[in-house]
Image: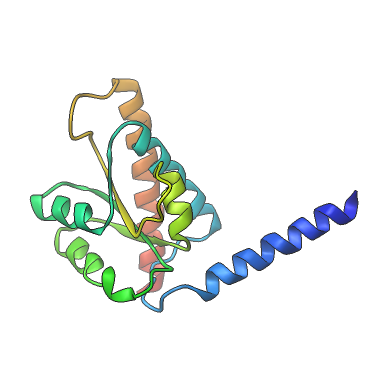
Amino acid sequence: MGSDSEAEKSQRKEKERKKMLALAPIAKPLAGKKLCKKTLKLVRKAAEHKCLKRGVKEVVKSIRRGHKGLCVIAGNISPIDVITHVPILCEEADIPYIYVPSKEDLATAGATKRPTCCVLVLTKPTKGELDPAEQEKMKAEYSQIVADLSELTSSLF
């Protein structure tokens, strides 16, 4: 019984190690375990409330149109040329962005089966209105993650 949990732990550690090896060299600021979990939770909630743009094309279009939010980019994209312009667009539009280790995890959080390069968590839904209580909860989570992200980037640069 104890050996099963040990085998599972070693298998999980091996999977994490493989994720880290597949990371692109430009994946900075990379979310740690705790921040990654919070970020993916926010992406999941945003997907439920239709406050999410998925994929490079949609994200770039939204940024150019002036929508604000948090850009979450997968760090294990190959070829990397697909997403190299997204952080630059985000910086120009003053939109915070963060890298997460896996595109598969990002897709699962975003309620799609297909691996996703990047998503944009919008501060308010594109169509309709959210319940005020739900919007406050999401706004609080969003601002918490942005604060953690700014702390991470200040230590990086």
Picture layout, residue 42 above or below residue 28: above
Look at 76% across and 56% down and name the residue there.
8
> In the image, 40: left or right of 66?
right
Residue 137 lies in quadrant? top left
Picture layout, residue 34 above or below residue 133: below
Please state which of residues 1 and 136 is positioned toward the viewer in this rendering: 1
Q: Residue 114 in the image: state x and y as whole percent.
A: 40, 52
Q: Residue 131 in the image: state x and y as whole percent.
A: 30, 20
Look at 11% across and 50% down and name the residue there.
66
Q: How many marks?
A: 0
Picture layout, residue 3 above or below residue 130: below
Picture layout, residue 101 above or below residue 120: below
> In the image, 6: left or right of 66?
right
Q: Quadrant of the C terminus?
A: bottom left
Q: Residue 25 in the image: state x and y as whole percent.
A: 40, 79
The outermost residue toward the bottom is: 25
The outermost residue toward the front is: 114
Look at 58% across and 71% down and name the residue there.
18
Look at 36% across and 66% down and name the residue there.
153
The outermost residue toward the right is: 1
Residue 71 lies in quadrant? bottom left
Please state which of residues 40 and 79 is positioned toward the viewer in this rendering: 79
Q: Residue 20 in the image: state x and y as whole percent.
A: 54, 71
Please state which of residues 139 and 62 is positioned toward the viewer in this rendering: 62
